[in-house]
Image (cartoon, rainbow, N blue to C red):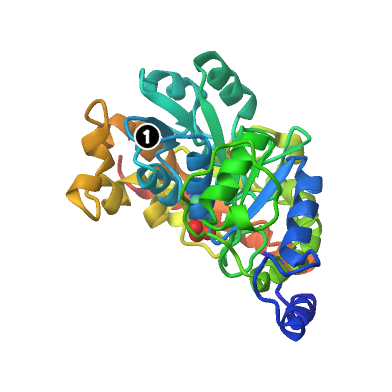
Amino acid sequence: MPRVGLSELFALGRVITNGQLLRYPRGAKGYTHRFETRLAEMTGASHVLTVNSGTNALITALAAAGIGPGDEVLVPAYTWMATAIAPLAVGAVPVLVDIDETLTMDPLDIERRLSPYTKAIIPVHMLNLVCNMDAIMEIARRNELIVIEDAAQAVGVSYKERRTGSIGHLGAYSFNHFKNITSGEGGAVLTSDRGYFERARMYHDPGSFMRGHGEASEPLFAGLNFRVSELTGAVLWAQLAKLDPFLRRLRRRHPIVARTFADLPNCRLSPHNDPENAVALSVIFDDPEEARVFGRTRGAERLLDTDRHVFVNWEAVLSKRAFHPKMNPHAWANREITYLPDDYARTLEILSRTCRVSLGAQYPLPVMQWQKRSLRNAASRAGAVGAAVPA
Ligand SMILES: *Cc1c(COP(=O)(O)O)cnc(C)c1O
């Protein structure tokens, strides 16, 4: 992620000097508003609403789309668990879908997991790797489903000349500490649908009707408070200027690192849904043991070992418990939803053989070249280790 530095400090200084920490300062338009306008221009989404986390961006998007009790929402079996928790927060239940080797939702498996109660799909662009959005939007169109892109891990990334978050009916970004740009915590909802935007704004701010937004065409309902302060808006405004340079840095490094793994006998690059615009990379081994060994190298990580990103480790979701038994979405579901490892063996199998590889964007090119060589050596050494393990 880009560094936080002087430009963030300068913007924060202006907010503090001004003394107006609410994101709706009297009179002038503040940093948060400018951030939203600029992000909308960059992504092509007509409306952007900043909220205080990526999780709340997903929840707000689901609420805006009218998803609720009795509804099923498809989420991938490999994602940060917030993707599965968001449907529960609006009373719906998550139904898991296998990933394919691109590490994103397998469109063929989406078709298999559909039920008469499916209302929405949340495809997740994991690790800056984009989903097969053409196929997903087509399935959604045929089955009248709402698509909410979880682009928390791929803020600003392009898929076939369009930006993630702007392709589905709604999109969610996260700006927490680990994402492409950061304000420590933060998120955004993107949409080009005026009605969804109005409902999102109502949901994220119980006082939205008093803020001079003008008459809304959507009927008013009681929302929560997921607003950001101008402090967050100021940091995001400064960070946004660094997003495209950061993505360009990744994109320049991609072919250099990709070539490194091109001719190794024991592993290959994972397929990518838009190879021309790739800004991230993973490699897939034939043997899980080799992936495990390679995953211990600096700059690499085996995906099966990434804890709460793998559904078998989502204890809170798997328990099907809620903070109050009468507020449990599983009690409102139209059928019993299960999360058995055997039903998603394909996801586990792919994750056991796949390693994420860092493109070394934080290093200058010569250091990154050195890292690249050490990764290549580690991958071929892993081959030797793997071969030594009896089958
Ligand atoms: C980070 C993340 C979220 C949630 O974002 P927060 O800002 O941490 O709430 C949701 N989905 C995915 C895929 C993420 O990586």
As drawn, 111 above or below 165: above
Q: Quadrant of residue 43?
A: top right
Question: Cβ of disc 1 within 8 Å of ligand 1?
Answer: no
Quarter holding the N terminus?
bottom right
- Residue at image coords 47%, 34%: 66
Local packing at callout 1 (Cα closer than 10 Å; few below 14, some 14-19, many 20+) is many
Q: Nearer the viewer, residue 111 or 28?
A: 28
Q: Nearer the viewer, residue 141 or 78?
A: 141
- Residue at image coords 40%, 41%: 87
Residue assigned mark 1: 96
Q: Position of residue 9 (x, y in %)?
A: 75, 81
Q: Nearer the viewer, residue 40 or 30?
A: 30
Q: Do we see residue 270 in this rendering?
A: yes
Q: What amino acid type should be assigned to the residue bearing mark 1?
A: Leu
Give the side of residue 8 with respect to residue 97, left or right: right
Q: Position of residue 259 (x, y in %)?
A: 72, 45
Give the side of residue 134 with respect to residue 66, left or right: right
As drawn, 222 above or below 341: below
- Residue at image coords 40%, 39%: 77
As drawn, 362 above or below 193: below
Q: Do we see residue 338 in this rendering?
A: no
> Most extreme residue toward the top, as rendered?
142
Quarter holding the C terminus?
top left
Give the side of residue 176 with respect to residue 293, left or right: right
- Circle 1 — which element? strand
Q: Position of residue 86 (x, y in %)?
A: 42, 46
Q: Quadrant of residue 148?
A: top right
As drawn, 86 above or below 187: above
- Residue at image coords 25%, 34%: 332
